[in-house]
Image (cartoon, coloured by chain):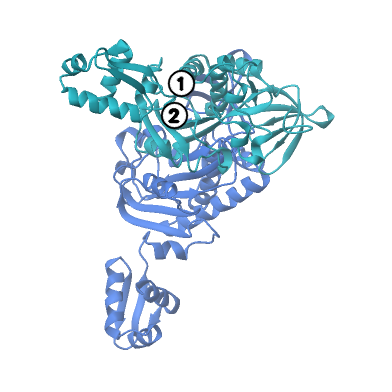
Chain colours: A cyan, B blue
Amino acid sequence: MKDTVLKSLKQKRVVSGQSLASELGISRTAVWKYVNQLRREGYRISSSPRLGYTLDSVPDSLLAAEIEENLQTRIQGRKIISCREMQSTQDHAKKLAIQGGSEGTIVVAETQSAGRGRMGRSWASPPGGLYFSVILRPGITLAGAAGLPLVAAVALARAIQPYTAVAPGLKWPNDVLIQKRKAAGILVEMSAEMDRLDWVVIGIGVNVAAASVQLPPEIRRTSTSLAIESTRIVHRAQLLGDILYELEEALDMFQTQGFEPLRKQWKEKSHTLGKHVTVVGSRQSIEGKAVDIDGSGALVMECAGGIRQRVTSGDLFFKGGAHG
Amino acid sequence: MKDTVLKSLKQKRVVSGQSLASELGISRTAVWKYVNQLRREGYRISSSPRLGYTLDSVPDSLLAAEIEENLQTRIQGRKIISCREMQSTQDHAKKLAIQGGSEGTIVVAETQSAGRGRMGRSWASPPGGLYFSVILRPGITLAGAAGLPLVAAVALARAIQPYTAVAPGLKWPNDVLIQKRKAAGILVEMSAEMDRLDWVVIGIGVNVAAASVQLPPEIRRTSTSLAIESTRIVHRAQLLGDILYELEEALDMFQTQGFEPLRKQWKEKSHTLGKHVTVVGSRQSIEGKAVDIDGSGALVMECAGGIRQRVTSGDLFFKGGAHG
């Protein structure tokens, strides 16, 4: 009912308590109660005896109702779990996926107390950022899944692009850089047999509001945020809507046309190819020039003596510093 | 304590109730109670007032104590969950893996009421077969995991070989054939991020005792069992111990030397390469000659016009019937 009151306020901008009450079939006192709830959530609603209620401003909130309003998707985000604080949206989404949670379910939190990045690392999640995980059930094989991180990175870069003065660049496998610093990251986890995926959970973290000093010291030099780089104010529910839209588009393309068109887009946005890099894997480091992305999403490197090597996982560092 | 009584009986073959009682620090009545329990489980134990108890024969049982006695492994099978009946050993092992179950934990059942094969198919599990799942936590990347079904198939074929008159042959990706009929199958499932595997559960089903008529009609023509093909009596706990031993060896090799030596072994045991086959995938069928296994475990096919195609998943059928 609170969401219905909000919807009505948004549509009409100004509406009397009496007409709201009769429209929704509740008492004027009940209307007043919901309005106060909305005020506590950050909606600025003024009231005058003559005009009634006026919605003055909408908070930069990640409440389900705000997210829903910004959705332009068929599937992604059609079920929303939104919390103020959560240990990890990724762990929560994985639990839901195991229990049969449907494709497009998103789990979003204002802050995470145990946000996770790749390979068991932590992901700093101060308030004001965008941290969410989405459940996918794509009809692809495990071999095809190797392309997913790059597909997600392309979608994320496309969604972020309108917010930044400089076009984002992609660092293999799936970081989004702005001005050579990391603004967003992706974690892809899955449950699968060889022939088919059971579920995939993609976690996305975007540094939105963080000023440089709010980022952990160890990543300050190599990270940035939309607040630092942005040309316009970021409304996170809208940004989330934009990301889900681009993700749905990219996944549709991936499933109908294969990896090739996404590979092309990734390469166009690349801040990796042509650079001298070191990729540190769990067993060995490979040094050389990043020359291509192959048909499965692997990085192709040209190493000493002109020998080409395919790299399927690891951490990439640019030669001469993390910045590239 | 029952297991200790059994161990003592196995070591000594003949032992008096009194000496068993004093050895274990229990009453003679307690010894008698445990002996009767063992008898109910299928151990044939005779008793005479003069000699005491004699262990005459051991049942073909999959009780944890019997399995333990046949283990020659460091890790695989070092934790055993053995049940008379279970819906699916695979689902049970996956649940344990999600909860942090340790590497080498095996789940084994005499029969399964909802045994699963690849791609959501059922796996017929009449009593007398060997159905188990093992939890692995291998230090490999998701890209490396593509080789796992073939690694497991090599191990399974090596373990079964001493039981059969004719050497088993491998059908891509992971069926073990005897005389061109399926005697055992493998299901590999995993939870992973791109850079590392969280867990892998390998399910193995071996048709051991089934006579042809005990197999479901729809697979009777294409399946066989060790009872039909075997040159010796199969003690399932021993077969399980053999499989776990070969699996541990093959996994060690895979993790230290990579896929290459296992690829070579798979090819030596192949009943696939050189044959005209159709591979039916979820989206398309590919017809051609199976010519190689590549470095990641994919099947290389030579199709019309000499074009080579890599196939990473699907069902393989031999041209001119399922038998090859």
Q: Residue furthest right?
A: A305
Q: Chain of mark 1?
A: A
Circle 2 is placed at which residue position? A134
Earlier in the chain: of badge 1 and badge 2, it is: 2
Q: Give the Cα separation between the discs numbered 1 and 2.
A: 9 Å
Identified at 38% across, 73% down, the residue is B6
- Nearest to the observer: residue B92 or residue A56: A56
Where in the figure is residue A147, as x and y percent of width and height? Answer: 56, 25
Judge left or right: residue B300 versus residue B61.
right
Q: Of residues A70 and A307, which is closer to you in this image?
A: A70
**Is disc 1 in the same subunit as disc 2?**
yes
Up/down of A277 relative to B97, above or below? above
Q: Position of residue A140 (x, y in %)?
A: 47, 25
The reply to whether dot 1 and dot 2 touch (C-beta < 8 Å) is yes
Secondary structure of the residue carrying numbered label 1: helix
Residue beneath the point at 53% across and 57% down: B75
